[in-house]
Image (spheres, rainbow, N blue to C red):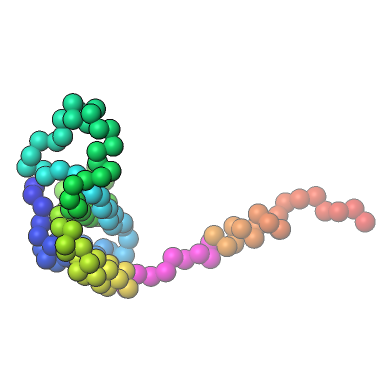
Amino acid sequence: MGHLTNDEFFTKLADVFNTRKAKAHGAIYLTQKRLSYNTNQTPPSPENEEQDALADLHPSQPLPLLVRATNGKGKEHRAAKVKLSTVVQPDDLAGFYARYAEVCKAGMAALKPRDRTKRKAKAKKRKGGGGGVAPAS
């Protein structure tokens, strides 16, 4: 599966957020990393890396960014798993991040806050109230 264009990525990412809202549970994983070589080419050879062990720390030109999103479905729901990826060129990063933030904020706006009352009740039980020997008077 190839990489999507940035516009296709945002459209499908919005769909993933919307389907997640409808089900009211689940996870969406967003990852990004530097794309150190073109996926159509072969990876850098080990001989060249031995010559300069830190060659990737000072590239000759800015490197593109690989952005991925998945809905977190595991082995039992593999048919429903959604995997999205796109490559962002260094010149397009500012515009990409602005739109990426909009899509993520819109997708997270309708989320319900986590119910923390159970957690607070457990913490109170641990701190002060339970099961010790009463002080003698």
Q: Is residue 27 visible?
A: yes
Please identify the quadrant where the C terminus is shown.
bottom right
20 or 32: nearer the viewer: 32
Give x and y (percent) for residue 39: 11, 43
Q: Tell me if 133 is positioned left or right of 101 in this view.
A: right
Q: Is residue 56 magenta?
A: no
Q: Tell me if 56 is positioned left or right of 111 in this view.
A: left
- Give the magenta part as a residue range: 110-118
Which image quadrant is residue 91 in?
Answer: bottom left
Residue occupying the point 17% across, 50% down: 61
Give x and y (percent) for residue 11: 14, 66
Residue occupying the point 19% across, 44% down: 36
Prevalent SS, magenta region: loop
Give x and y (percent) for residue 78: 19, 46
Which image quadrant is residue 124 in?
Answer: bottom right
Residue occupying the point 19% across, 53% down: 62
